[in-house]
Image (spheres, rainbow, N blue to C red):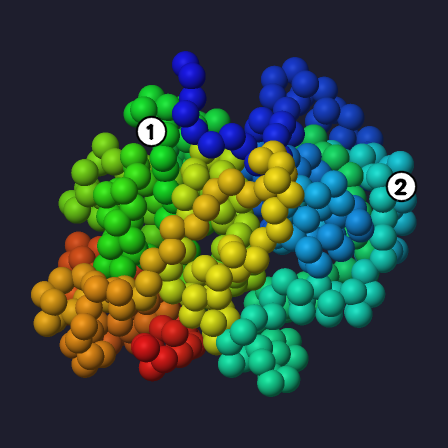
């Protein structure tokens, strides 16, 4: 079947490092004799994405030249666009050197083997530079010297990088496991090959993706339906890897999406999918990452609304939209990002308009508007507060209330300006 979908990023088709069958069995046998390196949850997700082609054209962890180019110019050493470093940190005391063959292990399971082509030091200054390039934004917690006063304690992405070990290792990998995802999320955990096949079977050529890490409220629903109107279909694509404390777990969010699709969408026009990454909390840069790997899934439009992938008040409300206008262009379609942003203004429910609206369509003042955000919803649910009318669908809210009622400890949720609506 001829596909009308956007080509995978990098010009090499889907680059899948996952081994199966006899190849996998043979490599697992070899891994028993290799040095075992325990990896982080983040690295586990990165490996799975390399395995299934989600990170095409990457076939391993980045060299120092790639790391530097990505941080500085959004480009790997060969000029291929990439917005966020994909690196593997180790302690120098492990003694890993160039040329080593090692096994990458998580909680007793071998996830991959790796041929080490480079080992490079990551000093405190290197990590600080990476944080400034990748995580610093234009919001009030980033400007006027505030970033390093606030980020070391409050920005989960910065904390993650600063806690990395003192060396990175680079090299190609052979992935041996997709972890728990195929079993725990059957029909929702989808590989790029699977989504592409589903889109092709439906005759889709123009596909949008909605990124979710929060339960789907009315603004999310509105964004998805805008895309349904102008595209062939929408992939509602939830992160099912690890989040920060206080975020709602994946199984609860996935069920909430299923409830919403069942009751409020034409099912033929939407697909509920999940991907196995951890959040990096890189704000605008993460928005670019979302578009990059969605291209591999067959998506050519990435929905970008207010404060996409935001953290606290580190980023401007529409900085994740604006950054798409600054990415480098080489003129080579294989190297440049082909998944484009679908930029949507601040959306809300307006009692005067008697429906969902945005700043581009609603002439009324903020007193008529129900400001919708995942953070605001989580805060209200965690505190047992009343949910404002028109914030979410009743069936979804009932499901989420059951989750919060099951918790034995109160969840603290920090409210930022973007979520409160103070900056509207």
Residue lying at 60% horizontally and 85% vertically, measured from the top left: 144
Q: Is residue 378 visible?
A: no
Mark nearer the viewer, 1 or 2: 1
Instruction: Quadrant for the N terminus, please.
Output: top left
Residue lying at 41% horizontally and 44% vertically, measured from the top left: 301
Q: Which of these two is toward me, 158 or 138?
A: 138
Side (left or right) of 258 relative to 124: left
Q: Quadrant of residue 228?
A: top left
Q: Residues within 10 Å of mark 2 (few under 14, many from 20)?
A: some
The circle on residue 48 is: none
**Residue at the front extreme of this rendering:** 331
Residue lying at 62% horizontally and 51% vertically, measured from the top left: 328
Side (left or right) of 64 relative to 185: right
Q: CA distance from mark 1 to mark 2?
A: 45 Å
Side (left or right) of 301 relative to 329: left
| Image coordinates for residue 201, horizontal then vertical, percent | 33, 21
Q: Is residue 371 visible?
A: yes
Dot 2 corresponds to which residue? Answer: 98
Does dot 2 land on a helix, a strand or a loop? Answer: loop
Residue lying at 56% horizontally and 61% vertically, measured from the top left: 282
Q: Which of these two is toward me, 164 or 227?
A: 227
Q: Which of these two is toward me, 322 or 291?
A: 322
| Image coordinates for residue 65, horizontal then vertical, percent | 80, 49
The circle on residue 204 is: 1
Does dot 1 land on a helix, a strand or a loop? Answer: loop
| Image coordinates for residue 101, horizontal then vertical, percent | 83, 34
Q: Quadrant of residue 410?
A: bottom left
| Image coordinates for residue 71, horizontal then vertical, percent | 69, 58
Instruction: Quadrant for the C terminus, please.
Output: bottom left
Please determine whether, in this image, residue 156 is positioned above or below residue 8. below
Q: Which of these two is toward me, 12 or 195?
A: 12
């Amino acid at each position: 079947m001829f596909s009308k979908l956007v080509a995978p990023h990098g010009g090499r088709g889907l680059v899948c490092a996952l081994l199966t069958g006899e190849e996998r069995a043979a490599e697992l046998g070899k891994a028993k004799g290799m040095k075992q390196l325990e990896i982080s949850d983040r690295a586990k997700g990165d490996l799975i994405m390399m395995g299934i082609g989600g990170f095409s054209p990457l076939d391993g962890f980045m060299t120092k030249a790639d790391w530097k180019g990505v941080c500085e110019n959004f480009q790997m050493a060969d000029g291929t666009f990439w917005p966020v470093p994909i690196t593997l940190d180790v302690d120098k005391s492990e003694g890993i050197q160039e040329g080593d063959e090692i096994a990458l292990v998580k909680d007793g399971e071998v996830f991959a083997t790796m041929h080490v082509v480079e080992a490079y030091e990551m000093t405190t200054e290197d990590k600080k530079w990476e944080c400034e390039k990748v995580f610093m934004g234009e919001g009030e917690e980033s400007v006027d010297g505030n970033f390093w006063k606030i980020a070391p304690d409050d920005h989960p992405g910065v904390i993650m990088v600063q806690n990395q070990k003192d060396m990175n290792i680079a090299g190609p990998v052979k992935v041996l496991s997709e972890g728990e995802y195929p079993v725990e999320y059957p029909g929702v955990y989808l590989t790029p090959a699977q989504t592409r096949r589903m889109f092709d079977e439906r005759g889709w050529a123009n596909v949008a993706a909605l990124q979710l890490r929060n339960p789907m409220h009315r603004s999310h629903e509105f964004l998805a339906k805008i895309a349904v109107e102008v595209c062939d279909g929408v992939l509602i694509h939830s992160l099912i890897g690890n989040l920060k404390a206080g975020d709602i777990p994946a199984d609860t969010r996935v069920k909430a999406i299923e409830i919403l699709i069942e009751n409020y969408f034409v099912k033929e026009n939407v697909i509920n999918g999940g991907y196995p990454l951890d959040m990096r909390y890189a704000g605008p840069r993460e928005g670019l990452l979302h578009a990059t790997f969605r291209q591999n899934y067959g998506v050519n439009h990435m929905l970008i609304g207010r404060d996409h992938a935001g953290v606290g008040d580190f980023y401007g409300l529409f900085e994740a939209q604006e950054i798409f206008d600054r990415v480098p262009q080489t003129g080579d379609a294989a190297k440049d990002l082909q998944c484009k942003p679908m930029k949507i203004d601040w959306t809300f429910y307006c009692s005067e308009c008697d429906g969902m609206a945005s700043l581009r369509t609603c002439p009324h003042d903020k007193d008529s508007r129900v400001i919708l955000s995942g953070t605001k919803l989580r805060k209200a649910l965690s505190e047992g507060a009343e949910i404002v009318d028109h914030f979410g669908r009743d069936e979804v809210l009932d499901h989420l209330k059951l989750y919060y009622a099951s918790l034995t400890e109160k969840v603290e949720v920090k409210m930022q300006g973007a979520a409160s609506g103070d900056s509207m």
